[in-house]
Amino acid sequence: MKSYQTVERYCRRLAHLGHLQAIAGWDEAVMMPKGGAEMRGAALAELAGLRAEIFRKSEFSEALDQAESESAALNEWQKANLREARMHHRHMMAVDPKLFEEKARLTVICEQAWRELRAANNWKEFQPYLKRLLTLVQEEAKSRASASGLPVYDAMLEMYEPGLTTATVDRVFNQLKQVLPDLIERVIDRQKSRQVTHLGRTVPVDKQKPMMRDFMNWVGFNFDHGRLDESHHPFCGGVPDDVRLTTRYSESDFLSGLMGVLHETGHALYEQNLPKEWREQPIGQARGMAVHESQSLFVEMQIGRSREFWQYAAPILKRSLGESHDPHHFWDPENLFFEASRVEKSYIRVDADEVTYPAHVILRYEIEKALLLGDLAVEDLPVVWDEKMRAYLALSTLGNDANGCMQDVHWPAGLFGYFPSYTLGAIIAAQLFSTVEKDLGRPREMIARGEVAPIMSWLKEKVWSVGSHQTTEGLLKQATGRGLDIEPFLLHLETRYLMG
């Protein structure tokens, strides 16, 4: 067991440094003044370099080899932890440490430039930042592909969802591309007959904030181990014992803010409920970003945008936010459901409804794959983005880069290979909820009564407490009895938007 214990010791050191990276990254996005970007980039580069040094120590590599040769003496969790440690080690050894450091430094600079230049719709000045960062990411991807034997884009997918391949993404996305255009048109046409009452006034942020916290408490967020702040782009960061959520509030659309908070809280619940005894080990981490997105979309889409949620939430919202002169029917549960389930073609991915959302993701997947492979130059990005937006959503973004190719933080953050996780997460969320319906009987009635604890307990048992003990395919089979299945997602969309 001595070699295995050495592996655990190294992983613990890496987790501690990762903790600092996570909190520094949160601070950079939420609290840091823009003048701190250069030195923060240097500090994060130093951390990245330290982690790379640890991974490259011969004692770590030798301990991994020896522990694997003696794995018969390990229990099932230790064997799985060793498997995950080997995967992380392989990922880190594939890339020159100097590249990690340079990427960490450039990412902070590029993100800060993006925040300022996106607000000014200034693609021309932002383009050189993205081009420099993409060059590094392309170099990283080639190194990972060479080390793993995977195709270049698959090697980057592996970083965010282990085991995911372009073949799987293409198969699923091609199915969606066949179904989505007609589905979107049918839903939009059906909703034309809806009579929806709008609030017609703003809701002050200071009234929204306590309401958001109440709903976070409702689904089980632990404020002793987390906090909610504001940022330019909503995200969930930090570490399991100190989860950092962010959102952005809109006084003209408080429902958007509420759904965003529920979404990020889904991520946070996963983090807070990972197996505590394995927190500082690879197996104690979330399985991958597709599974992570499934948890945020389970809370936001499967629960939060359901008709039953509004039966529970409407009286609470009216008490918290309502005023005597509000339109008579606005706070009715059915009206709020109509507001929250409105489908329309729009520019912004994070604000998109769940029917058009996959089109946004498919567009980004196709573009980032072309960028990574060198088939698309950064200079041509706005034109290609516009072409695909017109093809998939009948919208033009020419001259509107802030709401086009500059709208997401992912590429300025160097995250290439991430986008497929969003729609795969929606598919997994629907698959999980369909199993919840079989296992718990009537979960929708529970939601309408505000009794979500049994649903959360099911998720904790089947997903959260599993960490990375299982592969994604294994986790799905254990939780739902089958591998990735698109049918529950398609049935969910048909039922909610064409039959409900």
Image (tube, grey):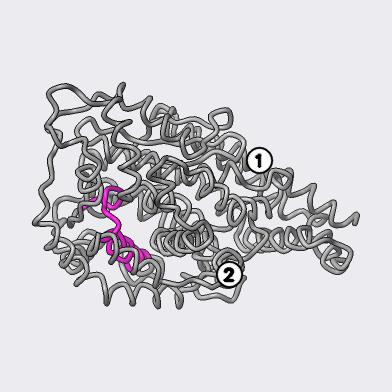
Q: Check the picture and name the quadrant holding the N terminus.
A: bottom right
Towards the viewer: 75 or 45: 75
Specify start and end residues of the magenta stretch as a single range: 347-368
Q: In the structure shown, which secondary structural element does the residue marked by tag 2 occupy?
A: helix
Mark 1 vs 2: CB contact within 8 A: no
Marking on residue 477: 2
Q: Which residue sits at x=62%, y=53%?
A: 461
The tally of labels here is 2
Nearer the observer, disc 1 or disc 2?
Answer: 2
Is 471 contained in the magenta span? Answer: no
Q: Position of residue 40 (x, y in %)?
A: 50, 34
Identity, as a three-letter code, of the amino acid under mark 2: Lys
Residue beneath disc 1: 17
For image coordinates 32% across by 66% down, the residue present is 362
Give the main secondary structure of the magenta stretch.
helix
As drawn, 252 above or below 394: above
Mark 1 residue crowding within 10 angstroms, few (<14) / some (14–19) / many (20+): some
Query: CA gap, disc 1 to disc 2?
Result: 34 Å
Q: Is residue 113 visible?
A: no
Q: Is residue 22 visible?
A: yes
